[in-house]
Amino acid sequence: MAADKDSLDARVPPTCPAAISQILTHAWHHDLAGLKPLLNVPGRASVQEPTTGETPLHAAIRACGPAAAGSNSDPAAVKAATAVVEELFFSGAIWNDVDSNNETPGDVAARLGQTDLYTMCVEAGVRAELLFGLLEGYEALSSEDEDEDMAEEEAEEAGGENGTAEVEIEDPDEAPELVDTEIVDENPDRAFAPPQPANGGDVNSEDYLRSNLVYSDGKLVDADKNGVMMAWETSIMRASVDALLPGLEAGRKILNIGFGMGIVDKMFHETKPARHHIIEAHPEVLTYINGPDCEFGKDWEAAGSEKGAYQVHEGRWQDVIPQLLEAGETYDAIYFDTFGEDYAQLRMFFTEYVPGLLEESGKFSFFNGLGADRQICYDVYTKVVEMHLSDAGMDVEWREMDVDMQGLGAEGEGEWEGVKRRYWTLDKYRLPVCAFMG
Ligand SMILES: C[S@@+](CC[C@H](N)C(=O)[O-])C[C@H]1O[C@@H](n2cnc3c(N)ncnc32)[C@H](O)[C@@H]1O
C-alpha cells in the first residue's frame, strides 16, 4: 500500500481544478483508454496540480506503490503504468518536473523501487537532452530569441524542461535547472511553483571569472560562497590521475585545465612528467599560483627540461587551446575540470579540441559532476555524455567509486560549512576514462 503522503487524496486535493484532476485521476488509475483522448490537446500531458505539483507522470508512477523486495510489485499494475507512462511521454510529458516534495517522476520511481519506470524516465531525459543539444547547435536563420523559444518548445515536446540545457560542469551549476527554473506562467495548467532551494542561484563563467575568491581550510570558494573546489574531492583526483596514467609512468605529456587548489596538478607533478601544462583563467587563482604558498610558480616552470615544458598558460582554455594546437602540442593525458561553465563547453572541448590534442594512445578525463545533485540527472547525463563522446570518436569507460556522503555532512554542516550549496549528493562517483575508438 502506498504511504499516506503518496495517496491520491494527498496528491490531488479537492481544490484541484476539474480538468487537471480528471487527467491526474485517469493517470493514477492507469486508465489508458480514458486518458488518451484527454491528451489530444497540446500541453495536457504536463499539467500540474497547483498545490502539490503532481503531474500525470508522478501520478501514474506513484500509484504503483513500493515494489516488493526484488520485484516490481504487482506486475499487472506496473505493466499498466508502463503503458500510461509511455503514452504520456509520447504526448509531451516533461521528465523532470519537480513536485512539492522536490521529486521528479523518476525520483518517485526510484524511491518506490520501481526500476522499470525509473529507466523509462531516464530514457525520456536522455531523449530530451539530446534533442536540446541538437537544437542548440542548429543555426536557424531566425533571431536568437526565436531560436531559443523554438528549442525550448521542441525540447519540452520531447519530454524535457527547458532549463535542463543549463547543466553546468562543476559545483553549484552542475545539475540541470530543476528547482531553480521558474516555470510559473500564465498557463493555469502549469501554475505550480516548485520549491526553491534556500541557497539556489546560478553561476556563470563571466561573473565567476570576475568574482573574488577565498582559499581557506580545504576549500576554494567564490564571493558568493559557491564551492569552486573542495578537499573532499582529493580521492576523485587521485583516482583520475591513476586512471589517466596507469602505473604512474614518468616522462608523460600532461595537460590539466583548471588549477583550483592544485590538487590534481600536485599528483601529476609527482609522476615526473616530460611536459606538464596547466591552463587557468581566474586572475586570483593565478595570483595564488605565483604566490609563496604554491609550488607551481616560476621556479616550477624553470625546472622543466626545456623552456615551456612546465608551464601555466594564463587565460581561458577557449583562448589558450587554439595556440597550443597551433604550436603542435599533444598530450598523453588530458584532465578537464573548470568551474561555472555549462555542459556545452565541455562538449565543445572534447568534440573540437581533444581529437587534435590527445596522442593516439592517450587518455582524457574530466570531473564528472554533471547533474550530481540528483541521481536521475546524473544517470541521464552519464548516457548523454557517452553518446556525445561517441560522436566525437571516443569510447568511455566509467569507473564507479564510493563517495563518503555521511562523512561530508548535511547541507551547511561538516565539509559543507561555509559553502552555499551542497553540489554533490550522491554516494557513487562515475569516473570517466576516455580514449579514441578502435
Ligand atoms: C574545480 S577547480 C579545479 C580543481 C582542480 N582539479 C584541483 O585538483 O584542485 C576549477 C578551476 O577552473 C578554472 N576555470 C574556470 N573556467 C576556466 C576557463 N574557461 N579556462 C581555464 N580555467 C578555468 C577556475 O578558475 C578554477 O581554478
Image (cartoon, rainbow, N blue to C red):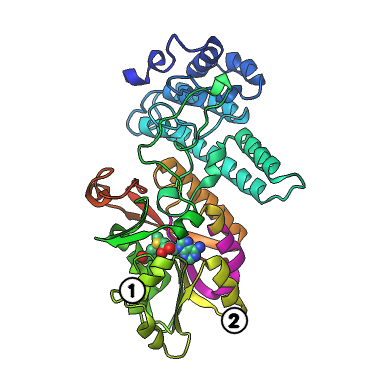
Q: Position of residue 191 (x, y in %)?
A: 51, 22
Where on the picture, by quarter, is residue 243? bottom left
**Residue bearing the label numbered 1:** 266
- Cα separation, mark 1 vs mark 2, equals 25 Å
Q: Is residue 206 above or below residue 355?
A: above
Which structural element holds mark 1? Answer: helix
From the Cβ of disc 1, is ligand 1 less than 8 Å away?
yes
Q: State which region is magenta.
A: 346-368
What label sits on residue 60 in the rendered view?
Answer: none
Label 1 is placed on what type of residue?
Lys
Q: Position of residue 240 (x, y in %)?
A: 38, 65
Q: Position of residue 384 (x, y in %)?
A: 54, 49
Q: Is residue 354 magenta?
A: yes
* 399 lies left or right of 88: left
Q: Is residue 143 above or below residue 431?
A: above
What label sits on residue 327 in the rendered view?
Answer: 2
Q: Quadrant of ligand 1?
A: bottom left
